[in-house]
Amino acid sequence: MTQPKRRLTFDAPRELLLLEIARRCRACDVAARIGLTKQEARDYVGFECEACSEWNEDELAERDVPEWWEELRVTGLDTLRARADDHSDVEEGPEAVKRLSESWRVSSERRFVAPIAAPTEESYVLPQWAIQLVRAALFKLFRVFFRLRLSGVENVPREGGLIIASNHQTYFDPFWVGSPVKRPLRFLAWDAVLGWFMIGRLMGWLGAWPLRTKQGDTRTYRRSVQWLRSGGALVIFPEGGRARADGALQPFKPGAARLALEADVPVVPVTIRGGNRVWPKDRTRPRLARVEIIYHPARRFAPLPGEDTRACARRESEQLYETINSAL
């Protein structure tokens, strides 16, 4: 008689990255790597494929737990770190210290790669008064070099959780969209761009969060929900990549709509017009051209009677697409 699969409990610190599990989408067979913290591992019920947006019902099993789990649960992370500091040569240290120093391990019998990772520290963000000064200076430069025109800025609420969802035409988009907004903002940006010396560093100082676009990024998603529920504003580009020279919209991913539904916040659609002439995807360098930013009225997403969250997110994403596209 087979025993029923039991639900796992996790007692390690919340900020520790406990597991990184490997999965494949049942619909399109695309691989996904999903990082889970303590709370996320406890609540994990599946993942949405980044390639085809299909939902995959899933749950953690016994074999998803790394070998070092039991010792970590009993000993504690701080004790393991202290023991690691006492052993410069890990080959002579205890087994837990050896495992603490290991890099990613791949096992043919397991479906995951599991390290002990240190908590991720928050990157430096300028204080709000400094951000406002930088935004004001950038806005003056944009007026001169790109003849930037704005319309509908009054549609951006001054307080409360908010998502600003925009089309994506250039690497300047976060600065263009955020410069006239007089409230704290965070941006979801491609993690590779944040490694760039000038633009990446400036985006980080102004509140950009790295987003891994090639795999499920549960940590950034949960951080965004917490920020929105606490009354913050978040800028998202649902296309997930820059447009080409013709400026035509690419299909939207449902992530922005899912965030709005889970955090229960309104969405302000934004249309960037003319940015495709400045720095499209198929150009290596920017050039000068006229740009207009249009802030549409805010609206709150809600499911129809009998409609589930995933269907609602897809429907609202299509409506968001139509709104932004109507001003191109």
Image (cartoon, rainbow, N blue to C red):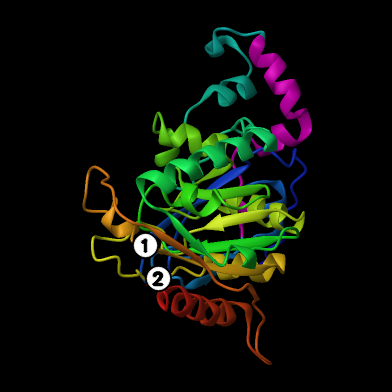
Furthest toward the bottom, the residue is: 305
Q: Locate the N terminus and report the quarter of the image it occupies.
A: bottom right
- Residues in magenta, as a range: 60-85
Identify the amino acid type marked 2: Cys
- Mark 2 highlights which residue? 52
Helix, strand or loop: magenta stretch: helix
For disc 2, the neighbor class at 10 Å (few under 14, some 14 to 19, many from 20) is few
x%, y% of residue 209? 55, 44
Q: CA distance from mark 2 to mark 1?
A: 9 Å
SS at badge 1: loop
Q: Locate the C terminus and report the quarter of the image it occupies.
A: bottom left
x%, y% of residue 40? 67, 53
* Left or right of residue 245: residue 262: right
Mark 2 or 1: the one toward you: 2
x%, y% of residue 74? 78, 33
Q: Is residue 69 visible?
A: yes
* Left or right of residue 134: residue 161: right
* Left or right of residue 321: residue 46: right
Question: In this picture, is 27 found above or below 126?
Answer: below
SS at badge 2: loop
Q: Earlier in the sequence, mark 2 or mark 1?
A: 1
- Mark 1 highlights which residue? 30
Whether residues under marks 2 and 1 lie with C-beta atoms below 8 angstroms apart, the answer is yes
Within the image, what quadrant is residue 244 found in?
Answer: bottom left
Q: Residue at x 68, y 57 (%)?
A: 225
Identify the amino acid type marked 1: Val
**Front one among 74 and 236:** 236
x%, y% of residue 107? 44, 42
Q: Residue at x 59, y 68 (%)?
A: 268
